Image: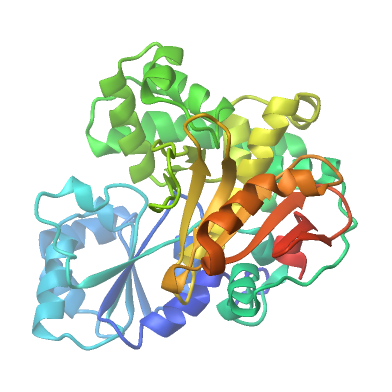
Amino acid sequence: MAADYRRRYLDDVLADMLPEVSGVLLTGPRSCGKTTTAIRHAGAVLRLDVPGTAAAVAADPDLALASESTRPLLIDEWQEVPEVLGAVKRGVDQNPAAGQFILTGSVRSQSSSRMWPGTGRLIRIPMAPLAQREIAGFEGSVSDLFLHRLFGRGEPDLSTSALTLTDYVHLTVQGGFPEVLRLASARARRAWLDSYVEQLLVRDISELGEGVDPIRLRQYVDVLAVNTAGVLAQSALAQSASITVKTSERYDQLLAEVGIIDNPQPWGRNRLARIEKRPKRIIVDSGLAVAAARLDEGTILHDGTLLGRFLEGFVFSQLRAEVLAAEDRMALHHVRGLNGRHEIDFVIEGSGGRVLGIEVKASTSVVERDARHLAWLRDSIGQDFVGGLVLHAGPNAYPLDDRLWAMPISSLWDE
């Protein structure tokens, strides 16, 4: 393993899955580290972004796969020769042994083919940009991560943090793309992210063959970026971007397909009446969201509304990375009452219907009243409520009430 490689949560997932299944498909936004991680689990690599290799595979995909007997075989950027999927299907049908194929690619997901050949042959494994625990150096196993331990024990470790609000904003603006973390200057990081946004809109989405107007798409991404982690009506988003609702819905679909936005759905049970049914829309990397909004650290620090939105988006990226790698099934939601009386930033539902609630505050201290929505959720669902956290930008962790705690945001990766 290369000395500069940061171990990923997905390394554990791949190590568990490859001895069990014939093939896996790593999905996620371009440059989040899919190929770098996949190479470490592959016996051989077929790079379809190399023109000569792509031409040979396109000429006879079955022969190309049969000619490489070492397994697992990594087929990188498979979308450059979509016909290779049929060869993978036929290969798995003929020999369903475990650990045969790893596929990576950034665009053209299952929806780009009327008959997706991967059904029943490839296990889809989504990958996120780096979380802070991965950046700092991930050791142990996925079961040691924050959410897993909280579901397991029912209460967190209460420890202090040396990070300030300015530190958290810096981490938010930096984000988690591996290439950004290799750059020393803020100017270089900003240029990389700006370039990523432009190439995403002009090149990557155009590869889907949609004939999208990049100017209107950019207008829509601008609106999404400044409203990241918001719960807005589709009509309001469309109006703000000067496009139709139908166009905005199609843009949502395309941005989700290239792995740039996630839409946490509302969580609710029959005991929770009058719950908002709209999803949140969150750009999956906080640094990318800041770049798309054309903002900087100083602007965010001095605008309370922007600070709250982007800090919430940053926390979402930490939680999402854990949920995607979870050993037991987890789902990430939000709760918002129709009248705005109750609102919880994130609700994580684990196995057996057990629930964690998380609020994010940009303040440096928290009082019991800040956990009132979490207390409402606790009282509404009873014993299924494992605990509620108010994550804040201050140094201290302390209990607020029964199964409710205030904790520094860095507790997500420092524990």
Q: How many marks?
A: 0
Q: Residue at x 28, y 38 (%)?
A: 207
**Nearer to the camera, 209 or 120:** 120
Q: Residue at x 65, y 74 (%)?
A: 154
* Quarter in which the N terminus is drawn: bottom right
* Quarter in which the C terminus is drawn: bottom right
Q: What x and y, as percent, mark residue 58?
A: 15, 58
Q: Eyeballing the image, is 262 above or below 402?
A: above
Q: What x and y, as percent, mark residue 155?
A: 70, 72
Q: Eyeballing the image, is 288 above or below 110?
A: above
Q: How is the image coloured?
A: rainbow
**Nearer to the camera, 119 or 194:** 119
**Nearer to the camera, 376 or 4:** 376
Q: Does residue 177 appear in the picture of this structure?
A: no
Tell me if 98 is positioned left or right of 190 in this view. left
- Tell me which corner region of the image, top left, top right, bottom left or bottom right, holds residue 407: bottom right
Q: Eyeballing the image, is 287 above or below 122?
A: above
**Nearer to the camera, 188 or 102:** 102
Tell me if 324 is positioned left or right of 139 in this view. left
Q: Residue at x 77, y 32 (%)?
A: 297
Q: What x and y, as percent, mark residue 149?
A: 63, 76
